[in-house]
């Protein structure tokens, strides 16, 4: 994909705004991306939805360490 498509896909996923530009525009979808790319975008959606700091805390080893 070109830069515009990839950049708008990442921004659309991170900000949870729906469609992007070019190949992921309002009349298209994310079907052509690989499974790994979709998983990365899903993580971006979660990070954007939950904000980045709670995600970092959730994934931190100290959070799950028994005291």
Image: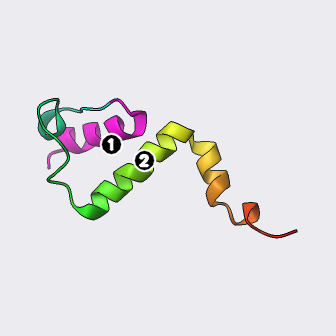
Q: CA distance from mark 2 to mark 1?
A: 8 Å
Which x, y percent locates residue 5?
19, 41
The numbered dot on residue 26 is: none
What residue sits right under mark 1 in the picture? 10
What residue sits right under mark 2 in the picture? 44
Earlier-in-chain disc, 2 versus 1 = 1
Residue at the image position 41 percent from the left and 39 percent from the top: 14
The image quadrant that residue 21 belongs to is: top left
- Horizontally, residue 42 falls left or right of residue 50, namely left
Q: Is residue 2 magenta?
A: yes
Residue at the image position 29 percent from the left and 58 percent from the top: 37
**Label 2: element kind:** helix
Tell me how many marks there are. Answer: 2
**CB contact under 8 Å: marks 2 and 1:** yes
Which x, y percent locates residue 19?
24, 32
Q: Is residue 14 magenta?
A: yes
Q: How is the image coloured?
A: rainbow
The dominant secondary structure in magenta is helix
- Image quadrant in which the C terminus is located: bottom right
Which x, y percent locates residue 26?
17, 29
- Horizontally, residue 34 falls left or right of residue 16, namely left
Part of the protein shown in magenta:
1-17
Residue at the image position 78 percent from the left and 69 percent from the top: 65
**Label 1: element kind:** helix
């Amino acid at each position: 994909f070109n830069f515009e498509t990839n950049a708008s896909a990442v921004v659309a996923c991170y900000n949870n705004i729906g469609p992007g530009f070019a190949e992921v525009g309002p009349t298209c979808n994310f079907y052509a991306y690989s499974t790994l790319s979709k998983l990365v975008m899903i993580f971006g959606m979660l990070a954007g939805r939950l904000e980045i700091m709670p995600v970092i805390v959730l994934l931190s080893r100290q959070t799950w360490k028994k005291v």
